[in-house]
Image (tube, rainbow, N blue to C red):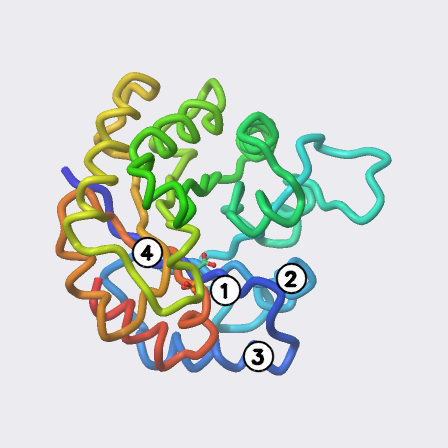
Amino acid sequence: MAPRKLAAGNWKMNGDLASLAEIDALIAAHPAPSCEVLVCPPAVLLHPMKERAGGARVALGGQDCHADLAGAHTGDISAVQLKDAGASHVILGHSERRADHGETDAVVAAKAAAAHAAGLIAIICVGETETQRDADQTLAVIASQLDGSIPEGATAANTVIAYEPVWAIGTGRTPTLDQIAEVHALMRERLGGRIGDAAQVRLLYGGSVKPGNAAQIFALSDVDGALVGGASLKAADFGAIIAAL
Ligand code: PEP
């Protein structure tokens, strides 16, 4: 049986306490979505979001965690702390983390192992740059990132993969449907060599998903949902994407 689809919103470094009203509005408009709904706000909003009526009814996730579960790492946050604040998921290896903080595949794998140890579901992001796509390296880049970023012990229950072409994030540009399908098929095949229940691993597409393009993307086989940035900030837009799943 295909896994239940997942709509995951990544608020990035946006939002404040007043923004929690968007979650209430989302739940009010979509009280019984057919897909799972996850919102990953800045870590400081996790607990207040969980306390709100709406937040108690959507799953919550962090946007990063440290590879250690506790210790002397000023400014960092651990997977255990995310879980304590109400998170069930954590996004790892987002291209903005890879670019801004120099996160390598090995670092992402270590963080994912920590997430698993804390009982969180790791959403591991992979994606090619525009230069890599133009050089026809996309499939090789994705295969290599997958191989290096997934820790031992990953299963369909504790790991989600998000394909996010770097050049499509926040740009309004998306790959063609054929290009998305090609990468997702490769990811499914590649996971088969690593994860026993690879057919059940949810594969999300991310990169300029909007209400206007969501249905077409979600109709592709091996697309099990979306990781949504900008369009997840407003209940109306994220709600329309959820409805398309
Ligand atoms: C993201 O940051 O994960 C993302 C997909 O952003 P956007 O939807 O804004 O392109």
Image quadrant where one finds the C terminus: bottom left
Q: Which residue is mark 2?
A: 47
Pointers 1 and 2 in contact (C-beta within 8 Å): no
Please determine whether, in this image, residue 46 is positioned above or below residue 82: below
Q: Is residue 222 left or right of residue 104?
A: left
Please determine whether, in this image, residue 95 is positioned above or below residue 218: above
Q: Nearer the viewer, residue 176 or 194?
A: 176
Label 2 and label 4: CA atoms lie apart by: 24 Å
**Between disc 1 and disc 2, whose residue precedes?**
2
Q: Which residue is mark 4?
A: 226
Q: Could you tell me which residue is drawn at 44 percent across and 66 percent down?
A: 170
Residue at mark 1: C-beta within 8 A of ligand 1: no
Instruction: Identify the amino acid type marked 1.
Output: Ala
Instruction: Identify the amino acid type marked 3.
Output: Ser
Q: Which residue is mark 1?
A: 56
**Between disc 2 and disc 3, whose residue precedes?**
3
Q: Nearer the viewer, residue 233 or 44?
A: 233
Q: Nearer the viewer, residue 75 or 155?
A: 75
Residue 208 at what x, y percent from top left? 36, 65
Q: Which residue is mark 3?
A: 19
Q: Nearer the viewer, residue 53 or 61?
A: 61
Pointers 4 and 3 in contact (C-beta within 8 Å): no
Instruction: Identify the amino acid type marked 4.
Output: Ala
Label 2 and label 3: CA atoms lie apart by: 14 Å
Residue at mark 4: C-beta within 8 A of ligand 1: yes
Please determine whether, in this image, residue 65 is positioned above or below residue 167: above
